[in-house]
Amino acid sequence: MKNYKKVALAATCTALLGGFSGVVTTANAANWLMLQGTERADQAPRAKVWGFIQPTYLQTGDTKLPTTGAAAADKFAGQDSQFNTHQPNLASNSTFQIMRARLGVRGVALPLDNKVNYFLLAEYGNNGITAPGGGGGSVKLSDATVTLNHIKGMRVRIGQMKVPMAEELYQGIMTFNYVNVSNVANQQLIERPFWTDGTTACIPGTSDANYLRFCDGGIDTQFRGSAVAVRDTGIQLFDTFKSGAWEHSYAVLFGNGGVGMDNRDNNFDTTAYWSSEKVFSGKGPWRDHMKFLAWSTKGKRTLYDSSILNAGGSLESAEKTYDRNLSGLGFIYQRNKIRFWTEYIAADGMIFTGSTAGGVPGAVSTSGSGEIAQFTMAPTGKSSGYYLDFGYKITPKVELDVRYDVYNRVTNLAATAQRDYTTTTLGLQYKFNKKTKMILNYEMREFNAPAFPSAAPPNKVAATMEDKISAQLFVLF
Amino acid sequence: MKSNLIKAFALLAVLVTPFIGSQAIAAKSFADAKIVLQISDPNPFKQTLVLNVASNIIKHYGQDNVEVEIVAFGPGLRLLFAENANKGRIASLAGAGVTFSACANTTRNMGKILGHPPELNSKAVTVGAGVVRIIDLVKKGYTLVKP
């Protein structure tokens, strides 16, 4: 009897320490659709509290906007540029900030019924969700969904959730290997919901009152609401099907078109997503796998035409509806020490184009005109971008990363409107443990206006873009 | 001729089956170890833990030399629900000789909450009361472990 007890104790201890090597094993069913949208059947708690924190340091050079000799390019000469300051405040070249801090709870409302799951998450950090355009900020709900698992092959998730799309943004934050996202993700996949296109000069005392209400009160008045970190509010149908080592997943999402959005245009966004994934080993977020994915989002947005507003037109006459369509392809390979990711993304409509002459939105022109810098949009523009991302674990705790990303912005309108962004990011990750890591990044950033000679004013402005250093501590709990 | 042969085999089977069964039981009763594992906790991690412990015991002794029975009652009965995420592991362990016992009292009470009886894993055997089953097994020489 004594021996039995010793063996039983030893077996318990071994299991507790994770020493189970297994006479029986099972494949893990998780992928991002399932990990974020469902709970483990009959093994989820009533309420699991979880979250993550990302204290971050960001630094760029403090090169100011240059004097080029061209009035249009020199409106904010001598001032900080939008691209050499840090989001969301755009107030400094170097800053400590809590980039994200999320706290949530998830589980099954009634543990006996695995058919109904819920997911709730709030953002406490300093970013475009809590403080679009900077300012004081406030806690915002990022996710709130209920998933119904009653129909085999078609789970139903209702509420506010991540839009299934590019892996770079759809993945859980715990596996994101950099501090900042690629250019195409930052500029176009993360949506900035503005009231106006911001392309007409905003000059207090001169511009029409209907226009000034959106452009003269500081940088945040141009925002209709929080930046949309690839979330939507609506209903998603989805599921995953296993076939040997492969998992095939689909999702179709119908939503308003963003977090807290009011579906002002009365058109729902429609997103379709497919991924086929071969699982090599592991489980949950950290498994080794090879994935192919394709997705598409179609929707419409309304925007006030700034030229109509500034000419005295009514809000009704100035409000226009534009397409906002996005699509992408991706390939992910992750096995043992090696990681390779690549994605291509195309955008049609509602293209974010930075700010007036590169100035910090809200800044007053140094030319004496009184013009105020704004965020700008090209509502009928098209863009595309891609990235190549390599990672190599030199030890289990240390990983080296390099990402090369390209974004060609506004490729279909006047050639002079196009801007091409290229960034090479060098990264080092040190993993203290499975849930805590430090990320150091150095971004070699550049952009240019390809229709202009290198000495032309737009390219002189572009040449002032500085490299960026980022350091971040990440903890998941 | 053919039908006579079939009848003869059938008769032989009827006569021999009880003997084979008692031989198997006799072999089991001489197992090196007899362990009953209790799961009655709502903590989902305990589900994984109790299955890990069962696996480790079998791995240590070999499946022919140990008797392992997992008795689930109270909130722990969720382990034996038909769609439990661990059903694959449960099937493997059952194949390795592990017995899974589901408390009938708990099943009945959960049915009242759900409005219908919970569907149990096909590998589970219903016993009257989980705790009584454990007491009976301990009296028979089993060692009780509650991971």
Image (cartoon, coloured by chain):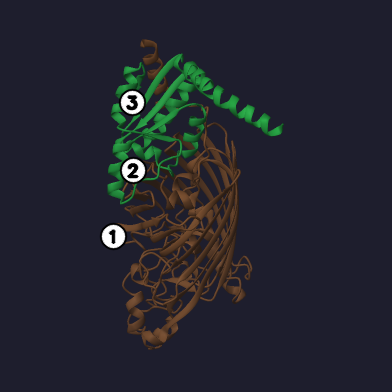
Chain colours: A brown, B green
Above/below status of A172 relative to B57: below
Report the side of B7 relative to A206 (left or right): right
Q: Nearer the viewer, mark 3 or mark 2?
A: 3
Residue type at tag 2: Pro
Q: Secondary structure at mark 1?
A: loop
The image quadrant of residue A143 is bottom left
Above/below status of A380 relative to A21: below
Q: CA distance from mark 2 to mark 1?
A: 36 Å
Badge 2 sits on which subunit? A
Residue A211 point in image, percent of width and height: 36, 81
User: Which of the numbered marks, if any, corresponds to residue A136?
Assistant: 1
User: Which of the numbered marks, if any, corresponds to residue A78?
Assistant: none
User: Can residue B5 be seen from the camera position used here?
Assistant: yes
Residue at x 33%, y 46% (from the top left corner): A112
Mark 2 vs mark 1: which is more N-terminal?
A: 2
Residue type at tag 1: Gly
Badge 1 sits on which subunit? A
Badge 3 sits on which subunit? B
User: Which of the numbered marks, if any, corresponds to residue A45?
Assistant: 2
The image quadrant of residue A192 is bottom left
Q: Nearer the viewer, residue A38 or B99?
A: B99
Q: Nearer the viewer, residue A27 or B61?
A: B61
